[in-house]
Amino acid sequence: MTLDQPVLELVRDHTAPVAITCDSKTCENWLVRRWTNHSWVVEGKATVSGETLLTATGGDYIALITNRRIVVFKKGIIKAIPYQPSRQESNARITSTLATPSHIWIGRNAGEWGGSLERIDLATGKSRNIEKPIDRRPPGTMKVAGDAAYRLITNVNGLLAAPWNPDCILVAQGLVHFDASGEIMQVCGSEEPKLFYHATLSGHQEVPFYGLAKSRDGGVWAAGINGLYEITANGRARRTPMPRFVPTGGAAISFMTPDLALVLTDIQRQTSMSGRDPMLVPLDASK
């Protein structure tokens, strides 16, 4: 079934896709449409009030994030929360979002200019960037104030609620620019970000990570530039080389594990210069 207006955002809410569209060409209202029984059912709308839709996210609820407010749709109740974005890199694009019970998380990536992780408090609408200065300078080099290379949270490519702790999220980050760098960070409550997992390529290069998904045994899957990683709660990992992908409908897909569909599209080329790093789509346990 086709939609009468272009899709502005598409999010996964548990197992169902949810599309955000306008109600008309002049877009007086944003509509939240859920794919149910082979049709797009409107389950909520928000009046557009001189604002720009930045992104949307799903999970425990559906949320629209604009440059002025957050509109939350949860169990038939609609709540608007005033919001002012925290400091952001002007050229950074939103790569991932995550809705947890108390916060909305927005990951951004600006390539060689860095990126950020933004946390929005749902109770107040207050926003802040999660970052901690860290010195990664090679010996004998000079630190540049504000340089993104010295942030612990920088080029964000994927976000995931940690399966082992509802108060924690995992952050996949990485960049290929001359050298390769990346890691998976863990952020728990108000604690400072901590390194959860990293792997090396060659020399001083690190594996960039581009996606995260839960595994059925309580761990996580992570898409690295050199393969698919299955990581346990204690940070131990097993790497599997990327499989062959079958072209289909302008993309390419693989079912290399019972947990996941791996999908390659041109979207990845915006954050990965290699374009070889798949989106991870969790499959229902019943299938």
Image (cartoon, grey):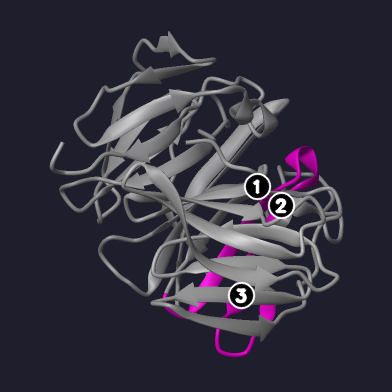
- Of residue 110 and residue 200, the one placed in the foreground of this image is 110
| Quarter of the image where one finds residue 80 | bottom right
Q: Can you give x and y, in whole percent of width and height, for residue 211 in the image?
A: 47, 40
Kindly state the secondary structure of the residue where label 1 is placed: loop
User: Closer to the N terminus: mark 1 or mark 2?
Assistant: 2
Q: Count the marks.
A: 3
Q: Which residue is mark 1?
A: 155
Residue 91 pos. (x, y %): 84, 48
Percent of width and height locating residue 214: 30, 49
Residue contact at pointers 1 and 2, CB within 8 angstroms: yes
First in sequence: mark 3 vs mark 1: 3
Horizontal side of 110 relative to 3 (left or right) equals right
Image height of 210 relative to 262, above or below: below
At numbered mark 2, what does the secondary structure look like: helix, strand or loop?
A: strand
Q: Nearer the viewer, residue 138 or 12?
A: 12
Badge 2 local density, few (<14 within 10 Å), some, or many (20+)?
many
Looking at the rendered structure, the kind of residue marked 3 is: Val
Q: Is residue 3 visible?
A: yes
Q: Is 104 inside the magenta-drawn segment?
A: yes
SS at mark 3 in the image: strand
The residue located at (19%, 31%) in the rendering is 258
Q: Residue at x 82, y 68 (%)?
A: 51
User: Which residue is tagged 2?
Assistant: 115
In the displayed structure, 52 sits above or below 73; it is above
Nearer the camera: disc 3 or disc 1: 3
The answer to whether one can see residue 136 in this image is: no
Foreground mark, 3 or 2, reads 3
Within 10 angstroms of label 1, few (less than 14), some, or many (20 or more) residues? many
**Residue 195 in picture, x, y percent from top left:** 46, 57
The span picked out in magenta is 101-127
